[in-house]
């Protein structure tokens, strides 16, 4: 888990904003003390990671063994746009932003 905290810390040095969406009542488990915009979504199970040009869909958890997870990289424009549209339509509207910790 420490590699994730290191990565997040590096992002903040470059002023990259991170929105972190978790299942309701999961909170900051595993990344306590990291300055992210935290959102809770009821019944969320998807693991979606976005940059400006790519998206990753994963079956794994950030704190599980990486070698047992299934991952799909969406880096073609139409694939990327489809998952962004899915996120904007079905996940984001159900998200509740939690106060900064």
Image: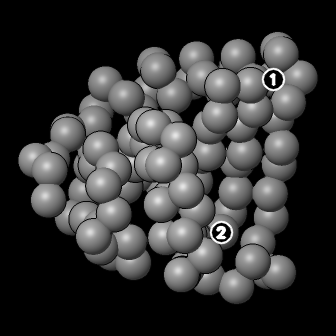
| 49 w.r.t. 93: above or below | below
Q: Residue at x 70, y 85 (%)?
A: 65
Q: Nearer the viewer, residue 52 or 76?
A: 52
The residue to which callout 1 is attached is 79
Residue 90: which quarter of the image?
top left
Residue 77: which quarter of the image?
top right
Determine contact: label 1, label 2, CB under 8 Å: no
Looking at the image, residue 38 sits to the left or right of residue 71; the answer is left
Neighbour class for label 2 at 10 Å: few (<14), some, many (≥20)?
A: some
Neighbour class for label 1 at 10 Å: few (<14), some, many (≥20)?
A: some
Q: Residue at x 50, y 58 (%)?
A: 8
Point out residue 3 in the picture as x, y percentages from the top left corner: 61, 76
Point out residue 43 in the picture as x, y percentages from the top left corner: 35, 53
Looking at the image, residue 93 sits to the left or right of residue 75; the answer is left
| 18 w.r.t. 86: above or below | below
Q: Secondary structure at mark 1?
A: helix
What whole-number distance in Å separates the C-alpha atoms at marks 1 and 2? 20 Å
Q: Residue at x 80, y 57 (%)?
A: 71
Point out residue 28 in the picture as x, y percentages from the top left corner: 29, 67
Q: Secondary structure at mark 2?
A: loop
Closer to the chain start, of discs 1 and 2, is 2
Q: Is residue 69 visible?
A: yes
Q: Residue lying at the far right in this picture: please name it.
A: 76
| 49 w.r.t. 7: above or below | above
Residue 60's tag is 2
Which quadrant, please, contains the N terminus? bottom right
């Amino acid at each position: 888990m420490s590699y994730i905290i290191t990565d997040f810390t590096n992002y903040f040095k470059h002023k990259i904003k991170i929105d972190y969406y978790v299942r309701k009542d999961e909170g900051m488990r595993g990344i306590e003390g990291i300055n992210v915009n935290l959102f809770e979504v009821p019944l969320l199970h998807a693991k979606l990671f976005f940059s400006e040009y790519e998206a990753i869909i994963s079956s794994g958890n950030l704190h599980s063994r990486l070698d047992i997870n299934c991952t799909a990289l969406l880096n073609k424009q139409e694939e990327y746009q489809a998952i962004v549209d899915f996120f904007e339509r079905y996940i984001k509207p159900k998200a509740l932003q939690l106060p900064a910790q």
